[in-house]
Image: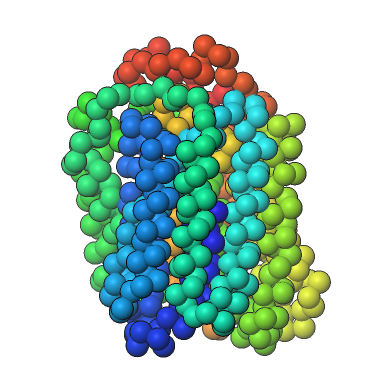
Amino acid sequence: MIVALDGTVLIVAQPSLQHDLGASVAQVQWTSTAYLLAVAALLVVAGRLGDIHGHRRLLLGGVLGFGAASAGIALAPGVGWVIALRAAQGVFGALLQPATLALLRLAYPPDRLGTPIAVRTSAIGIAAAAGPLLGGALVAHLGWRAVFVLNIPVALAIAALTLAVRVPTPPRTSGHGPGFTGPALLASGLALLVYTLVGVEAHGWGATPTLLGFLTVTVAGAALAVQQRRSAHPIVPPAVARSVPVTAAMALLLVTTAALFGTLFTATFLLQDVLDLDPLATGLRVLPMTALMVLGAPVAGAALRRHGARRTALTGSVLVVLGIAALSRLSTAASAAETGMGFALLGAGFTTVMVTATGTVVGDAPPGYAGVVGGLKQTAMNVGPTLGIAVAAGMPLLTSTGPTLLLLAGFAAVGLLPASLLPTGRPRALTPMTAGRRPEPASSPSGPGAGTANGR
């Protein structure tokens, strides 16, 4: 919630920050990019460290560090300090995000995860929706630094709750960390991937910087694969890599978030340049999406418990496709009801996919590996939006938004494939013996990951 609030508040504060610090447009963009690069690069490593050293410890360190970095930004004398401290925020944000999902897994059995995950999704939606309004009020009356001061009491409150709330002691996968080479290759590869995607808008898909970026990412990925096969303690254990529900859920999140954020990027041009609406009217047209994302999360949680992950995820994916397709057909004469219907379908579908995929990722994580699975999930949630915006930015938006939105609808339709690979039955409960059992080495075919290797 604090991460979602911080991200949406910053968008409102950036123009004021630019004028106050005399920053260039590129420097202001780096206040977002520096954070995104750091958090995307370190999420999986942070999750693995949580599995080894304890998730409460990483959550506490992450949230306190996030608050301290926020305090530093509020006192920053120049934009260079802001960029550096935003990167530090990304490091601490990477520590705390996988820990929240891992702690949910420890506190609830899989058949009861739907409700807490729905609450978590609603809280993130509320924070994201409230961010622009709260940020606008703070910037208008107190200046841009106030939006970072806001993080400090929130971080302290989360830290106090982390210390007060007790959860079952997690099974530890191994006393050994993943070493240095693997995390370095993974972090550099993910950071370069995000950097390359961010640069697509400026350079284009066929430009030399973009092609060199993707080539380097491919080389880093191949080197990582070779290194991990030889490693006695890989970052992503085989028990996780072989889990069909986990990998399918993460693929679904990747393509769906890409479609959503690419659509929102395109919708800005659609509503303001094609329908000639001002920013406030644009926000009101998008409001049905936000409302359905918040209100639909509990409904999605109930559907997951009643109908299982596969049916629920397929329904959500279809709603996302229909919502984007409806927006692609809008003309200059489109009414608020027509645009609202498209955004409402998009919001309802996205929250359904979010709750279902997150519940599957966390619920099907082999015992002792909830942290690394949570890190993989959050990585998909960070790379997906960057990919979607890059796809949208590479299309001729100013000429016509219809083809771009149809392309994104097709991108969302790809999510039907991983959705069809999710489990068909209702989430199953872990027995006390299974829930508390110390997992065997990942290489053992009889270990706890074997039960999820081929799905449920």
**Residue 121: where, in percent of width, then height?**
62, 49
Count up the numbered dots: 0
Residue 46 position in % (x across, y down): 35, 42
Indicate the quadrant containing the C terminus: top left, top right, bottom left or bottom right: top right
Q: Looking at the rendering, which quadrant does residue 326 occupy? A: bottom right
Name the residue rendered at 71%, 32% in the picture.
305
Residue 22, located in which quarter of the rendered image? bottom left
Q: Is residue 199 shown to the viewer in this render?
A: no
Q: How is the image coloured?
A: rainbow
The residue drawn where x is 37% and y is 59% is 68
Q: Is residue 108 left or right of residue 229?
A: right
Along the viewing direction, whichever of 420 and 426 lies nearer the viewer? 426
**What residue is at 45 percent from the left and 40 percent from the top?**
99
Where 211 falls versus 228 (above or below)?
below
Kindly tell me whether residue 344 is visible in this rendering. Answer: yes
Residue depicted at x 25% and y 71%: 208
Q: Look at the picture and state if 331 lies above or below 440.
A: below
* Quadrant placement of the N terminus: bottom right
The spot of residue 318 in percent (x, y) is 68, 50
> Is residue 102 shown above or below 211?
above
| 276 sits to left or right of 138 | right
**Residue 235 point in image, percent of width and height:** 30, 36
